[in-house]
Image (cartoon, helix red, strand yellow):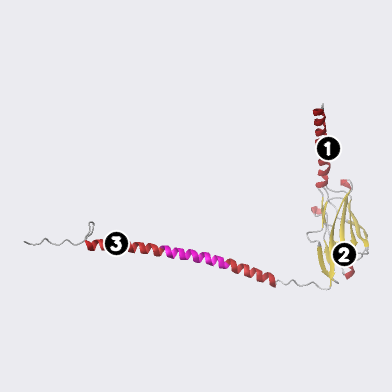
Amino acid sequence: MSRAGDRGKALARWLGTGLLGLLLLPMSLSLEVSVGKATTIYAVNGTEILLPCTFSSCFGFENLRFWWTYNSTDIFKLLIDGTVKNEKSDPRVKLKGDDRITLEGTTKEKMNNISILLRSLEFSDTGKYTCHVKNPKENDLQHQATIFLQVVDKLEEVDNTVTVIILAVVGGVIGLLIFILLLKKFITFVLKKTREKKKECLVSSSGNDNTENGLPGSKAEEKPPTKV
């Protein structure tokens, strides 16, 4: 009786795990939002900056809603709010909280781009910019991604001197190792040829000694027989 009970519990756990996996699978394959690889971007005061945002969905979308928000230490505001009817239409802006902002993206041809351009930057624009997307086709599933904008007086030039020195040193070491290997092979080749010549010389010298001593196998001149 206890074995049957244990089997029943094991089956229930297996079914529960399977159902949980089926529920989580659509979520893992559903809406995704990205603002690129960089988590922080820099821009010069008085210029403009493109804040990137793209989304993807394995289930498609209808009447998708998107909006951008700005958040600093003491300010939170809605920058832009809009919708996308379907995959064949471009985004439509319903609300814009800043006249300096324009929507630059397109959702046609599977671009799914809802990036915004912020003009006439000010130092007060420094802060977190979050791109939000909600898809009714996925039970109003919502995702967002955040990028940090730092407005500066001027962009600092990156000093590559240290990098160049390191690359030069590494290149020099690699070149030296290659030279040593080639030199080693050359010396080995010369020594081998020297040994072969020395061996030939010894063999030749040994043959000459045998000839002079008249040993068997030598080619010493035969002396004429002594006349009686």
Q: Which residues are magenta?
A: 175-192
Q: Position of residue 226 (x, y in %)?
A: 10, 62
Residue at image point 22% right, 62% down: 213
Please give left or right for residue 197 compared with residue 132 in the image: left
Residue at image point 81% right, 65% down: 41
Q: Position of residue 219 (x, y in %)?
A: 22, 60
Based on the picture, tell me whether residue 177 belongs to the magenta stretch.
yes
Q: Position of residue 55 (x, y in %)?
A: 82, 53
Q: Earlier in the sequence, mark 3 or mark 2?
A: 2
What label does residue 16 carry, if any?
A: 1
Q: What's the CA distance linking mark 1 and mark 2?
A: 44 Å
Please give left or right for residue 109 compared with residue 93 in the image: left
Q: Earlier in the sequence, mark 1 or mark 2?
A: 1
User: What secondary structure is found at the residue carrying circle 2?
Assistant: strand
Q: Is residue 122 visible?
A: no
Based on the picture, tell me whether residue 221 belongs to the magenta stretch.
no
Query: Magenta stretch: dominant SS?
Result: helix
Q: Is residue 177 visible?
A: yes
Q: Are marks 1 and 2 in contact (CB under 8 Å)?
A: no
Residue at image point 87% right, 61% down: 129
Query: How packed is label 1: few (under 14 Cα within 10 Å), some, or many (20 or more)?
Result: few
Q: What's the CA distance linking mark 3 and mark 2?
A: 94 Å
Front one among 111 and 50: 50
- Report the amino acid beneath label 2: Gly
Query: Where 56 sits versus 199, above or below?
Result: above
Considering the image in quadrants, where does the N terminus appear? top right
Q: Position of residue 109 (x, y in %)?
A: 79, 53
Which residue is disc 2 drawn over? 127
Front one among 82 and 160: 160
What residue occupies the far front of the structure in this picture? 2
Which residue is disc 3 drawn over? 206
- Report the amino acid beneath label 1: Gly
